[in-house]
Image (tube, rainbow, N blue to C red):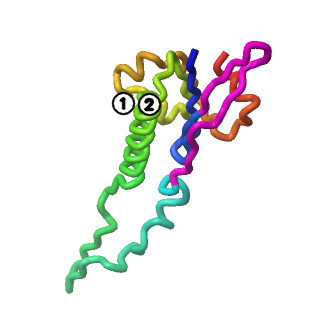
Amino acid sequence: MKEIVIVVDLGHFKAYRLIKSPMGSPRLELIEEYDNISAHGRLSEKLSDEAGRFGMGMEKGSIKGYGEAHHLELDIQKKIIKLIVKDINALINAEKPERWYLAAPKKVNNQIVENLLTEVRETLKKNVKADLTKVKKSELLEYFE
């Protein structure tokens, strides 16, 4: 039986193949791993403009661009989630496991699952709403039993 375990957060993606040996216990074999650089760091480090530095000045009153409500952090998060969903869909379609397991932080878990392809979502066996990207591989299986 072919099974896949995927653990993600906005900055990390790890996919494992679950291998069950006839005599021993199950083990995880890393298939794919990457870090999403755009998810790391503060927003202020990514923007080069300081408030008011490039504002549109007027003689009597001053109009500045930094007073507007920007949703840049939310937009970046949506793009990262879209990338994660695309990678999960591609991996599950390529590997064609009978079932697979997902662990993603509660904050983004529902958005990921809702955007998966229907055929991919149907084979999802267990969904853990937790960030397990830093959990040791040897301890990871305990969350999916």
The image quarter containing residue 21 is top right
Residue in the foreground of this view, choosing between 60 and 98:
98
Quadrant in which the C terminus appears: top right
Specify few, some or many for label 2: CA neighbours under 10 Å numbering under 14, 14-19, or 20 or more. few
Q: Residue at x 55, y 18 (%)?
A: 126
Residue in the foreground of this view, choosing between 96 and 127:
96
| Nearer-N-terminus badge (2/1) | 2
Is 118 one of the magenta-colored residues?
no
Q: Which residues are magenta?
A: 16-36
Given the image, on which type of amino acid does mark 2 rest?
A: Ala
Residue in the foreground of this view, choosing between 143 and 111:
143
- The answer to whether marks 2 and 1 mark residues whose Cβ atoms lie closer than 8 Å is no
Q: Residue at x 50, y 35 (%)?
A: 107
Q: Which residue is mark 2?
A: 94
Specify few, some or many for label 1: CA neighbours under 10 Å numbering under 14, 14-19, or 20 or more. some
- Left or right: 139 in relation to 53: right
- Left or right: 114 in relation to 139: left
